[in-house]
Image (tube, grey):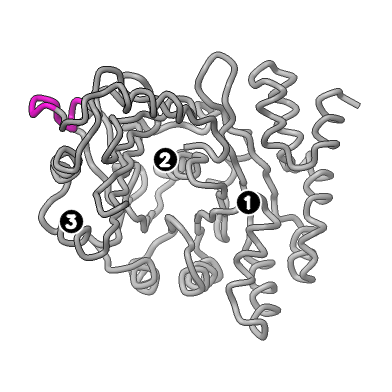
Amino acid sequence: MPGQTSVKTTAAQQAAAASTPTALPTSVKIETLLEECIRRNASDLHIQVGLPPILRIDGALTPIPNTPVLNSDAVDKLIFSTLDSMQREVLSKDKEFDYSFSFGEIARFRVNAFNEKGNLAAAFRLIPTKMPTIEELGMPQVISSFADYPRGLVLVTGPTGSGKSTTLAAIINKINIEKAMHILTIEDPIEFTHKSKRSLVAQREVHYDTFSFSRALKSALREDPDVVLLGEMRDLETISSAITIAETGHLVFATLHTNSAAQSIDRMIDVFPAEQQPQIRSQLAGILMAVCSQRLIPAIGGGRVVAAEIMIANSAVRSIIREGKTHQLDTTIQTGANEGMQTMDRTLAKLVQQGTVTYDDARDYAVDMREFERLVKGI
């Protein structure tokens, strides 16, 4: 899950070398491996030819003990047991496929099956069935206010495995419990499943319920939503549609693979042709409500904790976006603490001071090393 994590490659190599290069026994099935993933509180399970099954635990890759090296036949059987016939066709045609796999009532997994060196491989990401609350995630209280915005665009950003989907699930869950809204999610694949509570929730999965993000977004306004969750803004078409939906009075939540508010805004604007960018800046300045850019940091005693940069779109932020001066956003975030804003470095320093993470781990994620060290020392 993490952006920067330790990797016990040596352990994996040693386990592979010590194992007999035969397929897993037929008595060992994918269910056994997924149960082990859940039991050991791993974030991911990796299946690949030439290695034993490997778990990612607290950011580190660790082979499952007493499991042999997988050959191609074993890998094929393990992966195919999680696919239906249509999914197998898509994987065969596209050479890679994202999907979700429900493991009874215990858990769900987001899976990416792909080809490497002519063989199948897969990464299984564990998605808890229990819907987290914002408080349980250890997020700042200002994140709760995102659920109260009447309209606009809210971005949750970060590298792959930084907990973006979990944060968004907690926000959507809060709206679902507290407000009578129509919530529409468009995801690839669906990760957390939301049962309608006070709100009406409709979840659409790309490949199953719609052909693409862009097609689902085009029809979204005809489905009478109040809130739209877009799993990922991938290109000009999806970004443009998200802006349009937010401009027409809806609340839109979306993710980007970016590391800061400034980078997120630049990414959205830069996908458009140069002649359109002034107009997009103006539109974005009008609709953007907040950006949460987060990372997962190894915690003392095990597990990981969220560290986040939070920007709230006040009048100063809107002016900066409109004028194309995103390099000034960091300063605005630094001075906006009374409005709930916080820099990544301030968040990391606070976690160190609280004894939640080590200085060395926090330093690995610092944006401005001198500022981080100053904040840790309380200067």
Q: Is residue 176 left or right of residue 235?
A: left
The percent coordinates of residue 199 (x first, y second) are 36, 47
Q: Majority secondary structure of the magenta segment?
A: loop
Q: Which residue is mark 1?
A: 291
Q: Which element type, helix, strand or loop, lies under badge 2?
A: helix
Q: CA distance from mark 2 to mark 3?
A: 29 Å
Disc number lying in front (2 or 3): 3
Q: Residues within 10 Å of mark 3 (few under 14, many from 20)?
A: some
Identify the residue shown where x is 75% and y is 70%.
322
Q: Amino acid at mark 2?
A: Asn
Q: Which mark is residue 173?
A: 2
Q: Residues within 10 Å of mark 1 (few under 14, many from 20)?
A: many
Q: Amino acid at mark 3?
A: Gln
Q: Is residue 203 left or right of residue 57?
A: left
Q: Which residue is mark 3?
A: 87
Q: Would you say residue 196 is visible in this rendering?
A: no
Identify the residue shown where x is 54% and y is 69%.
243
Q: Is residue 152 above or below residue 190?
A: below
Q: Which element type, helix, strand or loop, lies under badge 3?
A: helix
As drawn, the residue found furthest toward the bottom would be 275
Q: Is residue 30 magenta?
A: yes
Q: CA distance from mark 1 to mark 3?
A: 35 Å
